[in-house]
Amino acid sequence: MIKNICCIGAGYVGGPTMAVIAQKCPHIKVTVVDLNEARIKAWNNEDVSKLPIYEPGLDEVVKEARGRNLFFSTDVDKAIDEAEMIFISVNTPTKTYGVGKGMAADLKYIELCARQIARVAKTNKIVVEKSTLPVRTAQAVKDILDNTGNGVQFQILSNPEFLAEGTAIEDLFQPDRVLIGGDTTPEGQQAINALVEVYANWVDKDKILTTNVWSSELSKLTANAFLAQRVSSINALSELCEKTGADVNEVARAIGTDSRIGSKFLKSSVGFGGSCFQKDILNLVYIAKSYGLQEVADYWEQVIIMNDHQKRRFAKNIINTLYNTVSGKKIAFLGWAFKKDTNDTRESAAIYVADYLLAEQAKIAVYDPKVETHQIYSDLDYLESRSPEENKKGISIFANPYEACENSHAIAVLTEWDEFKFYDWQKIYDAMLKPAFVFDGRNILDREKLEKIGFKYQGIGK
Ligand code: NAD
Ligand code: UGA
């Protein structure tokens, strides 16, 4: 039975996943390590409202387990040495250089972890790929471990994570399934069983699926591709709805009641964001291309092309509606995170919409309940469309939504935060320039109510 787990990478996946394992398995010591000292310091903050990531319910889990059997540290070597099972949960971003630039997953952090494990390990270890990885990565990890290790035996498992940000704790408590891939050898099966027993502390065994390593690695990319495809499919239809008088919400409801289609993931929006959908689909496209499967690659790439179109279309519509110019006009952004209930902004649609509008010399005023000011500036600076000084001139950030909207020509809703629905919209209207426009990129506001006040309202796909 496993008694000591280490996880390399204390990010959006490593942190919550290990916190839940520790809470549900008090008999297992769980140590989460990271090179980023500031991040580890924040995980150790006495005040659990200041953890490095915002995730509903996470504070309670950390409060219960931290210091008991959950530890956060920068001493990676020590944690590797002591653990019987090591999760690798580091980032695997899209490559920004060399072969596969802009498409392939950058595996340098994975390789560094494998080399560090090989160097430090003195006893047999089970190494678990928790990060999302291209199919056949386990072979590379195995090669490194087997060839640079000092006679230590390693078993490599694939255990991709399916949690969604904003609902991570719920998803971890009650996963639809847990997927574990391993070698078909007796040693491989033994390693699989060891990990099954960890999850079985709170997950029904019939929800724990075991497969070979390659199926497990590929299933993770496939799951994200299917989910993102649904969003791009409904978004593609949203444009047709706008031309024909159909209402995308009604269409989504009508098709979602077909049990073969299902109702989830049919919310039309300004476009999907987040750290994984785009990255993982690009990776899938790259893998297909590298096997010479051009049609397969083109098929999946269309999901990304549609998503880029949706973001651009939203920005263009704002410009067209505001009499074809937004130069010098104040446009208030409600929301900057890529979805509600998270402070994560990676690949958020808001960044791209802001970039298009800044290119048209708009003045943007942002309010987001959880995203920090420096993050918004660094998201824009990262695009390198203009200098950081110009970004600072174009964007102002407010801690109060009413102030963000004051004297604005238009409001754009970029994130579906619940609190937006409960604002005093009459007060907002009174303080805006007229005509006052609302572009609801999430279809969350009450159109009838807003129009009654006097707003000119536009949702997506209606
Ligand atoms: P993240 O960037 O939030 O966290 C990764 C952490 O790993 C960082 O804190 C970084 O400092 C650390 N790190 C990198 N190299 C290291 C090394 N050699 N030693 C120690 N620490 C190191 O990333 P994330 O969002 O947690 O994603 C991690 C992986 O999980 C990715 O492969 C991602 O595709 C996958 N995933 C993410 C989600 C999600 O919702 N974010 C969900 C499922 C799967
Ligand atoms: C997604 C998957 O849902 C997780 O299962 C997976 O583990 C994770 O990616 C990952 O591998 O990183 P996440 O990106 O955190 O999770 O959040 P989602 O809820 O999937 O939302 C992604 C984006 O799609 C958001 O911008 C969201 O607003 C958008 N979306 C989602 C829509 O526009 N419409 C929908 O109907 C659903």
Image (cartoon, helix red, strand yellow):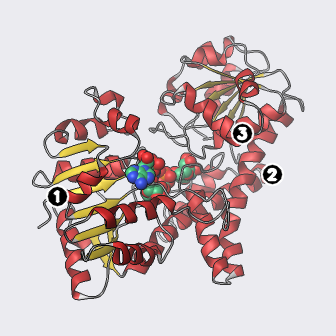
The residue at 65%/29% (across/down) is: 333
Mark 2 vs mark 3, foreground winner is 3
Task: Provide residue 437's location: percent of width, then percent of height.
Answer: 74, 26
Residue at mark 2 to residue at mark 3: CA–CA distance: 22 Å
Q: Could one spot residue 164 in this view of the protein?
A: no
Task: Provide residue 234's location: percent of width, then percent of height.
Answer: 64, 58
In the depicted structure, whether residue 153 falls above or below residue 185: above
Task: Provide residue 7's location: percent of width, then percent of height.
Answer: 30, 55
Task: Provide residue 312's location: percent of width, then percent of height.
Answer: 76, 46
Dot 3, crowdedness within 10 Å: few (<14), some or many (≥20)?
Answer: many
Amino acid type at circle 1 is Asn
Residue at label 1? Answer: 4
Image marks 1 and 3: residues in contact by CB distance under 8 Å: no
Residue at label 3? Answer: 353
Which labelled disc corresponds to residue 54? none
- Dot 2: what SS? helix
The residue at 65%/18% (across/down) is: 405
In terms of depth relative to the viewer, which is nearer, 342 or 227? 342
In terms of depth relative to the viewer, which is nearer, 207 or 360? 360
The residue at 67%/55% (across/down) is: 235
